[in-house]
Image (tube, grey):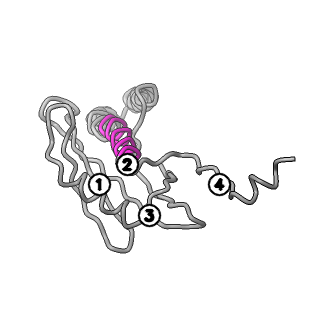
Amino acid sequence: MRFTLYTDKPVSQCMSAITERLHVKGTSTRPGIDGWVDKKGIFSMGVSSPVIGKLHRKTYLRAKIERENGVTIIKGDVPTGASPQGQLVVFGALALVALVLIVSGSMLLGLIIIPFAAILYIPMKGDYHNSEFLLNEVQKTLKAKPTPPKPAKSPAAKSAARP
């Protein structure tokens, strides 16, 4: 998923805030984030979370911070995985394909599809949870919002607006 966030902080403060957040150690309630920061305004953040038992999924968010017209814009992308309803659709479609293959006489191909459903479950569920967490962390760390800030009226414009 591509995203665009807006903040009033300058690029240098944003990069410092991201760097500080990357150095915070993980706790039981707030997992640690790894990643890197580039001087050109590019950064990456990654988080790992358990999906099934000891199987973990690591998801990375990548973004670039630029300053345009007095507003700092964060543009990036993060894999979103699939919602629980989307996962059901994928598994239903795979089950249907497996059933059609088995009924048509391709028992081996039909049975091979079943493990693929389990393999697909890990990135779909892991990315779904991790992407929300990473976007929230960027928004909290940079005090960023998905809507651009309203332009502040200058004092001259305020006095001219009064009758």
Q: Badge 1 local density, few (<14 within 10 Å), some, or many (20+)? A: many
Specify whether 46 is left or right of 160.
Answer: left
- Mark 2 is surrounded, within 10 Å at the Cα level, by few (under 14), some (14 to 19) or many (20 or more) other residues, namely many
Q: Which residue matches tag 2?
A: 138
Nearer to us in this view, 89 or 41:
41
Query: Whole-Å distance between the Cαs marked 4 and 1?
Result: 30 Å
Q: Which mark is residue 151?
A: 4
Q: Quadrant of residue 105?
A: top left
Residue type at numbered disc 1: Met
Tag 4 and tag 2, C-beta contact below 8 Å: no
Task: Say whether disc 3 or disc 4 marks the residue closer to the N-terminus.
Answer: 3
Q: Are marks 2 and 1 in contact (CB under 8 Å)?
A: yes
Residue 106, given in percent of the width and then of the height, sits at 35, 35
Q: Nearer the viewer, mark 1 or mark 3?
A: 3
- The quadrant holding residue 98 is top left
Residue placed under numbered mark 3 in the picture: 10
Confirm whether residue 143 shows in the render. Answer: yes
Q: First in sequence, mark 2 or 1: give its number.
A: 1
Name above or below for residue 43 compared with residue 58: below
In this view, the mark in front (4 or 2): 4
Give the overall secondary structure of the magenta segment. helix
Q: Identify the residue position indicated by label 1 in the image.
A: 45
Residue type indicated by callout 4: Pro
Circle 1 sits in a helix, a strand or a loop, which is it? strand
Whole-percent x, y for residue 80 in the image: 41, 43
